[in-house]
Image (spheres, rainbow, N blue to C red):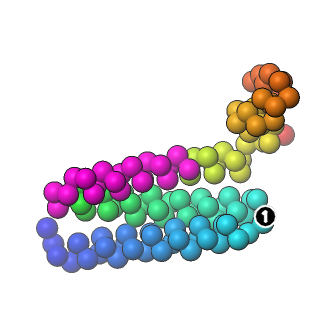
Amino acid sequence: MDPRGGRKLNIVAAAGLAVGSVFGLAGTLVTDPHLQAALWAIDSVGLVMATTLLTVKFLRKGCDVIAAGFLVFAIGESVILSGTAAQSFLPSRALECFGGSRCSRLHHRCHFSDIRFLS
């Protein structure tokens, strides 16, 4: 393995962690839901990229437990990213029905006909 390649991997992983930290904090401080979703999406992409690279790095070194931790983090952050994307692009009625927030409280049954993707 090229020693410069390992250094590049460290730099890219550190940049991904930095992007994730900065955009995650910025998304927390913003009140506009669309801007918040966009910032959190960028945050998640940076963190997924960084933790995936760190998973590969530690697998190559033979540190399986550390690599597994980064892999679990990457999978969890990917799930959060998909939730952020769904929250910003699906209509609110669909989120209520699939999330069950308002539907379960009102004992209302949601059907697929309630969801309008082009509204």
Indicate yes or no whether the magenta region holds residue 37.
no
Q: In the visual, does 103 lie left or right of 69? A: right
Q: In the visual, does 112 lie left or right of 8? A: right
Q: Tell me where residue 9 sits by quadrant.
A: bottom left
Q: Whole-percent x and y of residue 95?
A: 74, 39
Q: Which residues are magenta?
A: 61-80
Q: Whole-percent x and y of residue 38?
A: 66, 61
Q: Residues within 10 Å of mark 1 (few under 14, many from 20)?
A: few
Residue sitting nearer the eye, 6 or 22:
22
**Figure quadrant of the C terminus:** top right
Q: Is the stretch drawn in magenta largely helix, strand or loop?
A: helix
Q: Report the residue at 48% width, 64% height from top.
A: 46
Residue sitting nearer the eye, 71 or 10:
71
Name the residue that disc number 1 marks.
Answer: 32
Question: Amino acid under label 1?
Answer: Asp
Q: Report the residue at 24% width, 60% height from top.
A: 58
Q: Whole-percent x and y of residue 33?
A: 76, 59
